[in-house]
Amino acid sequence: MKSPNTPRRRVTAGLAAVVATAALGVGSITIAGAQAPATSSGIVLGVGANPSQRVVSWYTSANTAQSVQVAPTAQLVDGAFPANAPTYPATVAANTVNGGFNGHAIVDGLQENTAYSYRVGADGAWSATYAFKTQKFDGSFDFLFFGDPQIGSSGDTAKDGAGWADTLDVALTANPDTELLVSGGDQVETANTESQWTAFLGSDRLRQYPWAATIGNHDVGGKAYDQHFWTPNTDRSAPFYSGNQASQSGGDYWYVYKDALFIHLNSNAYNNGSDAAHVGYIRDVLAAHGDEAKYKVLVYHHAIYSPASHANDSDNQVRRRDFPTAFSELGIDLVLQGHDHSYSRSYALKNGQKANPDEQPGASQVTQGPGGVIYVTANSASGSKYYDLTTPRAGSDFGPDPLDPTGKRHYANSIEDQEHVRTYVRVEVRKDALLVENIRSGTCAAPNAAVERNNVSWCGPSNGARPAEPVGSRVDKVLIHRAAAPPVDTTVGGSVPATLSLTLGAPATFGVFTPGLGKDYTASTTATVVSTAGDATLSATDPSSTAPGRLVNGAFSLASPLQVGGAALPATVKTYAGPVSNDNVAIDFTQPISASEALRTGTYAKSLTFTLSTTTP
């Protein structure tokens, strides 16, 4: 990790386990200063612009100097931070609603595979200590997606908060190495009701894992959402607000996490050119950062292919006209949505229609193909509210699937499910595929506020005809493969010049011929052959007209012919039936001399010619 004033660099460290220190409520601190002591609450760990960054946000009652102090957990001694632990100064601003102030600090330069501890406040008035861990900054990873906690929507904020906290515990106990918690929107029922925000932020899990917030229609009507969450790379231009920027939350934002580029939209803004502005924003982000990640993931609240109460809302009809073709053209892989408090997973859709007519309902493996997009709608993560599935309207823009003989499933969806139990979505980002699972985090038993309060009349699969499945069981699981673009032929090559190359080694020598001794004397040399021809022959000849094929010493010559490779000259040393490169050939010479042969004082020798030739160059 780097100090706030040093250049950014990434350093790899060993993996360490997370040590989480429990805190009461949502965390509180007291800050000493010239003013009255300030209290702070609502501490939440947020996603940063990249894996080496986190954002910590909180509420505070006074505009005093505050910061976040961070250190590797291994450096803490009996819970005490080292004296040189860096602090990251907070930006503190006045709240627009509910009084007080909000602060946030960007923690940058984190090392991979490291457990960290942090606290907020100031010397003498630090908060409780919380912990998080980083993992490798590249490679596969998984994240969890949560639909509509919407705390307070059942009519019992405490029960809703209990269901939400239990889903976080269940999901993170089962997936302790998950790296992001991604929101589908509607954190609370009423935008500016702080008691609902307090219940939403009650679990320490939201201080241990980075929360990637999304604005829902129940969050957008006030400024509390913006006060609680600071998001990276946020564009707060007017088209990304559905109303008065001074009184509503809004904005689109993006971040890169390993091999996935996430883009969050404020889908509450859709009229008056806002949908076109969202598409333009996506296009600009992809142009600038699309090559930084393999997968492109969109996150927004209003599910355009949801199967329940909001399926045919007029605003969703607008989005179904504005988004699908653009998303296919832009190469979006996965769209994550909430709003309809039910689960659905679409077919691979290109321009809003099935990309592969042969894809079957509920398929466990899907190939997207160019332009294919998978749309997922998450059910309630808290159990505060569920919407029952609706029957598709024949002749509408969201009619029935012809592959469903009952006519009850919408044409775009491979899976639709409602059991009135809490669930979450797990997404594994792999090198060559995305794995998406919808997993039960609860049953019909408490905490399940909508069931407990009789807001729904049944619970369990098949409209309550069967008992609830156990916690951790899967509603849906699909492996999404990316198909390569259609093959395109091209030509690549190089030319080989006609080559016949022969290199001889050191000259061969027989040594001393001993008169009166009958013997076959031997010697050798080597040749290196390179040929690009279809065939080749390495041969040896004696070009001399004096005693052809025999060694000579002035006017004298040996009686027996010189043998090359066991044959008298001219001799074939080696033949090749095709090209050869750097073939090392051993060339053996034999000179027979009988015991009765007269030998003249001096040196017997002969210059030979070796030739590499071909009939098919």
Image (cartoon, grey):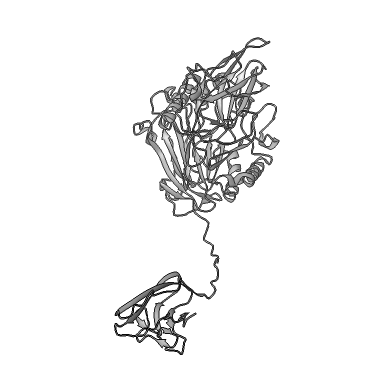
Residue at 48 percent across and 77 percent down: it is: 533
Residue at 29 percent across and 82 percent down: it is: 595
Q: Quadrant of residue 510?
A: bottom left
Residue 151 x %, y %? 52, 24
Q: Quadrant of residue 88?
A: top right
- Establish if 192 lies above or below 184: above
Q: Is residue 372 left or right of residue 452?
A: right
- Establish if 480 lies above or below 124: below
- Establish if 55 lies above or below 550: above
Give the position of the N terminus as an image quadrant.
Answer: top right
Q: Nearer the viewer, residue 471 or 589?
A: 589
Residue 517 in view: yes
Q: Nearer the viewer, residue 85 or 186?
A: 85
Q: Is residue 103 left or right of residue 510?
A: right
Q: Quadrant of residue 464?
A: top left
Residue 153 in view: no
